[in-house]
Amino acid sequence: MTIRVRFAPSPTGMLHIGSVRTALFNFLFARHHGGEFLLRIEDTDTTRSTPEATQVIFDVLEWLDLTPDQPPVFQSTRYVRHREVAEAMIAAGTAYRCYCSREELAAMRAEADAAKKPFRYDSSWRDRDASEAPPGVDPVIRLKAPRSGETIVHDKVKGEVRVRNAELDDMILIRSDGTPTYLHAVVVDDHDMAITHVIRGDDHLTNTFRQAQIYDAMGWTRPAFAHLPLIHGPDGGKLSKRHGAVSTMQFRDEGYLPEALCNYLLRLGWGHGDSEILSRDDQIKLFDLEGVGRGAAKMDYAKLLQVNAVWVRAAEPDRLTKLVIERIEATLGAKIGTVAAGRIAQMMPRLQERSRTIAELAESSMFLVHEVPLPFTEKAAAMITEEARDDMSAMLLDFARTDYTAPALHAAMVAYAAASGKKLGKVAEPLRAALTGSTTSPPIDAVMAALGRIEVEHRIFATLAD
């Protein structure tokens, strides 16, 4: 049997980080077992589904390298098939047409509210003949659900879960306008796509009991179900914007690397010993449902930042350079040119050692792009004293006699500091301020080598002229 799983988001807004973890677990499960990972866009809510939200789903999966093995299935294109299955259930006696009017249903709800009980349809049309139907009422198609016994689901995460059938009513399969309900469409689509394992959030667990009854009514083999505990905020409440980013694209915009986000989400509710940083190959090798915990996981943004920092340090400098240049150009609204791009590329191995996100990398690279006069932080401006100007003026002559490599420039600064009876920091820190506009940067000798002789002299002269 080929393992087949699916990720089935609704394109009705942002793609929540919890949904992405579900996609990741499905993807890894399929790859671990040599199976297939499929994508279904559940766009039956035509009033809320948008092309823009659909594109976000595609963009997120591409960014995270969670590539489906087949083109996506759009649920809205399968209405005929959904109706066909419902009609087959009527023919088999496991579904029926219900002609209850809106007024009758409203009265049932009011009665349930008055009794402080959950609303359940009273099955009044379960065994009535269509000849008794009132005029002007378009029927719905309802499942003829079992009334006795239990519906039992053997969940791969939660174990055996069950519900008394008396607690479930005859749910609607096809609405009066001919469109399928979500619960019905999902079952038909999963069956037709030959899905073997349904891995999703445990907020769908109550749906599973109803969907299991549709499988049974059609005589179809149920897939295996695995319901993942939800992701909560740091305070234990439902994860929301008040905790921080929840939209996956927001994490990208804030400068997180896709491999870091996937690494973190994998460890959020799944474990394998003490392993923390795992490559995609390792994730595929190790992942299985046995490692999924039963309790809700808490989003830890500080931990995510730590994980991202590890991946930033390990990333190829050329890749980071490209990402940083893209971010800087988006900020400036203009191209930065090959000279500035070359400086960033040269400095990247140094910059990535001290940055946790692409956003921080871009910010710390901006001094390589700025033209004089540089923007100065308050602390940096305070360092440009008359004594500092005298030191920089003198050191320019020493620098001019070097080959402008980092070791040679460092040696020149050490020699000048020794000759003038000053500590190295006393002459290097004001120089850093003059060349970067800041009090923090990679080693100043490396900064000077990346800027080059002409730009260093240009920046120092601009400082001396102030």
Image (cartoon, grey):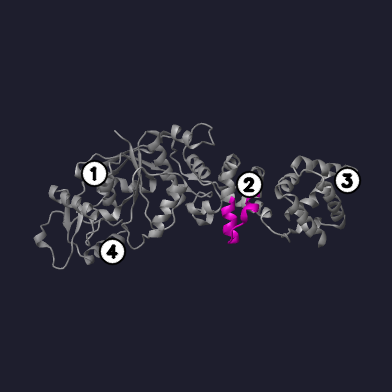
Which residue is found at the position 34% from the left and 41% from the top?
A: 5
Q: In which quarter of the image is the N terminus?
A: top left
Q: Can residue 229 be seen in this view?
A: no
> Magenta residues?
324-342
Spatial separation of the CA atoms under disc 2 and disc 3: 33 Å
Going from N to C along the chain, the mark reached first, 2 or 3, is: 2
Spatial separation of the CA atoms under disc 1 and disc 3: 83 Å
232 or 355, nearer to the observer = 355
Q: How many labels does the image show?
A: 4
Relative image position of residue 107 (x, y in whole percent) = 24, 64
Spatial separation of the CA atoms under disc 4 and disc 2: 69 Å
Relative image position of residue 213 (x, y in whole percent) = 24, 45
Q: Is residue 358 magenta?
A: no
- Amino acid type, residue under disc 2 in the picture: Ala
Relative image position of residue 144 (x, y in whole percent) = 19, 50
Mark 4 Cα-neighbour bin, 10 Å: few <14, some 14–19, many ≥20: few
Give the SS element for disc 3.
loop
Our reading of the magenta stretch's main secondary structure is helix
Mark carried by residue 422: 3
Where is mark 2, residue-wise? 345
